[in-house]
Image (cartoon, rainbow, N blue to C red):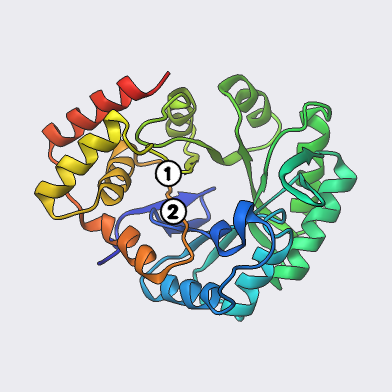
Amino acid sequence: MTIDAGDTFNIGGEFVVHRMGFGAMRLCGPFAAGPCADPVAPSRVLRRAIELGVDFIDTADSYGPAVNEEQIAAALHPYPDGLIIATKGATIRTPGDPRRRDYDNSPAYLRAAVEGSLRRLRLERIALYQIHRLDGRTPLEESLGALERLRGEGKIGHVGLSEVDVPTLEAAHAITRIATVQNLYNLAERRHQSVLDWCERNEAAFIPWFPLGGGRGSDADRVAEGIGARLGASAKQVALAWLLGKSPAMLLIPGTASVDHLEENVAACDVVLSPDDRASLDAAARVATP
């Protein structure tokens, strides 16, 4: 299993990272609440990811909450040169019900969230800070203005958004450069294709969350299984290889609490899909996507 040294993306014109990253959310408990059931798994998985060449890790202050950022620092600090840790803020977990969430994009909340993430991650500057969700109340000028002030203070580097549409991106990009967008996208779910196209045009990374959510039993999953059987790869590896080949703006963050699954995901970098394979997967995705 290898990560192609040349298969990279330049985030914000400053940080060059490999396009196979790692999403740390699954190192928490169910619904990203509380610690992992296996107390040694987070450190084991995170350290193995670094050994495999992963240099981009995605987390959020709501994972745990707070637990995930602390896991990363406990396992990897002092951080190796070149490692980029991206985190997200604005999500508020409901005590006692990990599936319920609220959102707050107010300048005061975002400032407190950034300060908390800096402390837990043991960083002086967060290379990429993402608004986890827009709250529908705070004007973009206020929330992004707050992040611009934090950037001016040297506390964050680049700004990203999550689960947004193209008009929102255009409005946000007019206020500050949007370096990354994190939207739902996978082999069977491609409703955000226009956002991916926007990222390509504007040199922003597109980070698909739930990249392996093809759906068991779907047309897309069955096609991936058939191709994988012929190539000696798993359906998950085929799905990841399809994403990597879909756009040079793709920056993947598949997550897991298993070293074996981590190694399987990274090995997807070695899966070579033919034009016919891609055509079959594209057709299956079109069927599966509303």
Q: Residue at x 80, y 54 (%)?
A: 113
- Comparing 220 with 161, the one in front is 220
Q: Secondary structure at mark 1?
A: loop
As drawn, 136 above or below 178 = above
Residue 215 seen by the camera? yes
Which residue has dot 2 on it?
A: 254
Q: Residue at x 31, y 36 (%)?
A: 246
Q: Residue at x 27, y 56 (%)?
A: 269
Image side of residue 122 versus residue 280, left or right = right
Label 2 crowding class (10 Å Cα cut-off): few <14, some 14-19, many 20+? many
Identify residue type, mark 2: Pro
**Residue 24 in picture, x, y percent from top left:** 55, 60
Which residue has dot 1 on it?
A: 211
- Please report contact status of discs 1 and 2: CB closer than 8 Å, yes or no: yes
Q: CA distance from mark 1 to mark 2?
A: 6 Å
> For the view shown, which residue lies furthest in the right direction?
108
- Comparing 86 with 32, the one in front is 32
